[in-house]
Amino acid sequence: MAEPIIAARGLTKRFGKIVAVDDINFDVKKGEIFAFLGPNGAGKSTTIKMLTTMLRPTGGSLMMAGHDVTKERDSARKSFGIVFQDPSLDEELSAYENMELHAILYSVPKARQQERIQELLELVELWQRKDSMVKTFSGGMRRRLEIARGLLHEPQVLFLDEPTLGLDTQTRNLMWNYVKRLSHEKDMTIFFTTHYLDEAEAVAERIAVIDHGKIVALGTTAQLCKQTKTKTLEGAYLQLTGTTLRDESGDNNALNAKMAIRNRRLR
Amino acid sequence: MRVMFVLWLRQVRRYWRSGSRLLGSIGQPILLLLALGYGIGAIYRRAGEGNYLEFLVPGIITQTVLLSGIFWGIIILQDKRFGFLAEMLVAPVSRIKILLGSAVGGATISIFQGILVFIISILFGFRPHDWLAVVPAFLVLVLMCVALTSFGAGMASMVDDFQGFQGINNLLVMPLFFLSSALYPLNHVPTALRIISTYNPVSYMVDALRYLLSGQTDFGLQKDLIVMAITFVACLYFAVNRFNRIQM
């Protein structure tokens, strides 16, 4: 069997006494579309942050495209692209300038740079607007630009952290079509999180469900349904994670944990 | 090098495009020059101290770069809050390069504003006592601007919201300015104020500029430069240290 493109072994992250990610193991195969599901505060964002070098794991090992993510950080960084959950463009720069800045940060060869930017902006249908400031763009246009930017340095893995949040149905459709095409044509691995289970069911080849920092199930939709004796992915998901609501906000675990520790000290 | 250049360019581009920032940044110094230079200047002369504008201009230049330098930190805060910092931090580039490229960009804006205020003050009737000394004065300005933007970047790395940053203005920038030798000569003030001012690094920045532009000094250029060099290193260390600790 081919070497997995992402391999997590015993991956753990603690913030003080809080265990956000608890000894998880998973492999993602090259060219696979992999969905990572879980309720808010389950450890999804923390895991993505560790995969993308924004957080250092407390324990375990993490390999990506043959690089140890904690030890060979820069090589690992070159091997993936990411579309963040929150917008991450410079609004005061034009679409082209945002792309150009990214190209230089990732040392894309100067000769390839312009052609590559044009190719990608045409792909996401923004070439006509390349000189407009990003602050004049709609939410969907920004998302498309972020995807184009994430692909600029020809990564082997593309992370999409809740990429369709707040997008209309047309844009969502278009976006998943790009993503599927990329995965087929370029053998690119796609790792995404979402709260829309229909998306996961339609797009993902395999799905991992995380809850309370642990992976509670991993497999194809059919396997998850079989495992939980349910008929739909939604049924399986609710079976696995329960129906109670979660209070933790998932947007910034490190910060939340920091605040939690600070509040406890104050008490 | 290309990375640092493009980050520098980003800062400069953003500044050029924002007309309001350009105008806002020179409005206050003009107001101060008018109100203080002309308003207080008359009394200053009557008190036998000579030309107040000559005394004041280095102080106003310092105030301009102090404000714009530390407030440049807001851009780091914006990047942190609105996500662009995440894009830079996951790039295969060291944080030091990101910080230095951006901070030198911020310093460039400050230097530009300092020079603008210098030119405006010439229109107001200010004349440097020796045109040759304008060149070393420029070098002092550069040193000041890099130190102050680094300080601003360090502060911005520590706070998480804009209100917090406003607090820094009231608690730090204003005292640093008003309790320095920028507005009044130190030889006649009450001892307490004099002591506070002598421990304020901004006093030495003003004093160095004043020595070079107006030929007046409280501490002597040598002491000014030593204090400034120490401040410069401390500010850089502070910025690198704090910026490295940012967690997304």
Image (spheres, coloured by chain):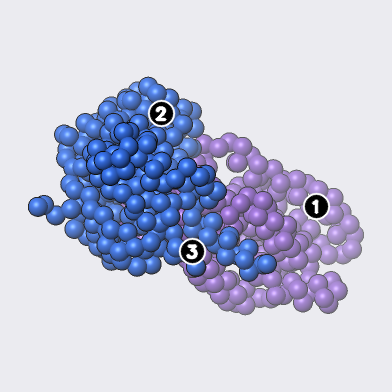
Marked residue nearer the N-terminal end (2 or 3): 3
State the CA–CA distance, disc 1 to disc 3. 57 Å
Mark 3 residue type: Ile
Both on one chain, marks 2 and 1?
Answer: no
* x then y, percent, for residue B174: 73, 59
Tell me which chain appears blue.
A
* A251 or B142, nearer to the observer: A251
User: Image quarter for residue A184?
Assistant: top left
On the same chain, marks 1 and 3? The answer is no
Colour seen for chain B: purple
| SS under mark 3 | strand
Q: Label 1 sits on what residue type?
A: Leu
Q: Tell me what residue is drawn at x 74 percent, y 71 percent.
A: B197
Query: Is A166 drawn above or below residue B60 in the view shown?
Result: above
- The residue pinned by badge 2 equals A141
Secondary structure beneath label 1: helix
**Which residue is depicted at the point 69% across and 71% down?**
B200
Q: Are marks 1 and 3 in contact (CB under 8 Å)?
A: no
The Cα atoms of the two marked residues, 2 and 3, are separated by 38 Å
